[in-house]
Image (cartoon, rainbow, N blue to C red):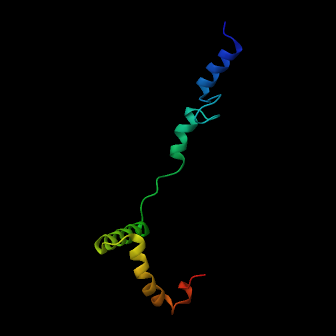
Amino acid sequence: MTSPHESDHHRSVATGIAEGPGPNPGRGPARDSLTSRDRPARRPGAADGLRLGALGAWLTAVARSGQTDAAFTACLTPSAQQAAADHDHLAEE
């Protein structure tokens, strides 16, 4: 005959409900395996490509300048502010 604790353990194993402390208290293996399928994988879109391209261009320009990122940004800031001066929607708040 099993003790009440042992029968609870066997029942929780059979239903996939974890009890007690662990990485995901209250969630058993069945729930963990479903969470990875709850959200469909997002495919990269055109905006992601533009962001990666812009980042690559920025990193290349910084590397070719021979300056640090901060120094390179400081050199470009006055020009960027002058270019944005005629465009109210680009003004800093």
Relative to residue 12, is residue 82 drawn left or right? left
Where is the C terminus found, in terms of image quarters? bottom right
Instruction: Residue 82 in the image: state x and y as whole percent.
Output: 46, 90
Relative to residue 92, is residue 42 drawn left or right? left
Asked which quadrant contains residue 67, the reply is: bottom left
Where is the N terminus found, in terms of image quarters? top right
Whether 60 is drawn above or below 27: the answer is below
Front position in the image: 50 or 42:
50
Relative to residue 60, is residue 7 drawn left or right? right
- Measuring 51% from the left and 45% from the top, which residue is drawn there? 37
Asked which quadrant contains residue 80, the reply is: bottom left
Instruction: Residue 21 in the image: state x and y as whole percent.
Output: 63, 30
Q: How many marks?
A: 0
Instruction: Residue 45 in the image: state x and y as whole percent.
Output: 42, 65
- Measuring 58% from the left and 37% from the top, which residue is drawn there? 31
Which residue ends up furthest to the top in the rendered image?
1
Whether 80 is drawn above or below 48: the answer is below
Whether 84 is drawn above or below 16: the answer is below
- Measuring 55% from the left and 38% from the top, which residue is drawn there? 32
Front position in the image: 22 or 29:
22
Relative to residue 51, is residue 63 drawn left or right? left
Instruction: Residue 59 in the image: state x and y as whole percent.
Output: 35, 69
